Amino acid sequence: MIKPEIAKAINQQINQELVGSYAYLAMSTYFEYENLSGFAHWCMMQHDEERLHAMRLIQYLLDRGGRIEHQPIAAPQSEFTCSLAVFKLAMAQEEANTHSINELYSLASAAHDHATISHLQWFVDEQVEEEKSVGEILSLVERAQNDVNAMLYLNDRLAQRPQESAE
């Protein structure tokens, strides 16, 4: 049976993953409205990925005998001034998620909950990948924002992102 303080923290992380998922959905719809379907596709893939992360945590918590505590999810920001603003928000969101995962990992370590530590290692590694991916796109958007051709090239490139497996 999982310790109550660990279960509570995992429930908070589940909420954070779902908040992130909802935010990426809002970003995707913004890009669709702006007729940047490649950017929209990339954000929709992120939406799906964050939702899968939440589901992975939900299943883990259930497997350990913990209760799922569904929490409210506030409406995400859905109005943006430009593509750069979207990816600055995405980067801040990923950094906050990394911090949250690290705090949960530290809590599990202090509690000597080795099963949770093992489970969370995947999330720690995943966040390195997430920040790298968003950081690269943010850097490219910063360089391309005043060049329509560069933005359209980037839009085409992001449209090619393949569907990832749930692992």
Image: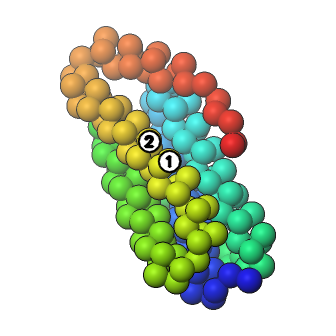
Image quadrant containing the N terminus: bottom right
Find disc 2 in the rendering and name its residue.
Answer: 129
Number of numbered discs on residues: 2
Q: Identify the residue at horizontal 47%, vertical 24% (top origin).
A: 158
Q: Identify the residue at horizontal 50%, vertical 47% (top origin).
A: 126
| Residue count near mark 1 (Cα–Cα under 10 Å), binned few <14, some 14–19, many ≥20 | some
Observer able to see residue 34:
yes
Observer able to see residue 35:
no
Q: In the rendering, at what x and y percent does residue 84 appear?
A: 29, 37
The answer for how far apart the CA atoms under marks 2 and 1 are is 5 Å
What's under tag 2, amino acid-wise?
A: Glu
Residue 160 falls in image quadrant? top right
What's under tag 1, amino acid-wise?
A: Glu
Q: In the rendering, at what x and y percent does residue 163 appear?
A: 64, 30
| Residue count near mark 2 (Cα–Cα under 10 Å), binned few <14, some 14–19, many ≥20 | few
Mark 2 touching mark 1, by CB under 8 A? yes
Helix, strand or loop at label 1? It is helix
Front residue of 136/30: it is 136
Q: In the rendering, at what x and y percent does residue 79 appear?
A: 41, 48
Q: Residue furthest bottom?
A: 4
Front residue of 99/64: it is 64
Q: In the rendering, at what x and y percent does residue 5 appear?
A: 57, 86
Judge whether 117 appears above or below 34 on screen.
Answer: below
Helix, strand or loop at label 2? It is helix
Image quadrant containing the C terminus: top right
Residue 139 falls in image quadrant? top left
Q: Identify the residue at horizontal 47%, vertical 34% (top origin).
A: 31
Find disc 1 in the rendering and name its residue.
Answer: 126
Q: Identify the residue at horizontal 42%, vertical 65% (top origin).
A: 102
Marking on residue 149? none
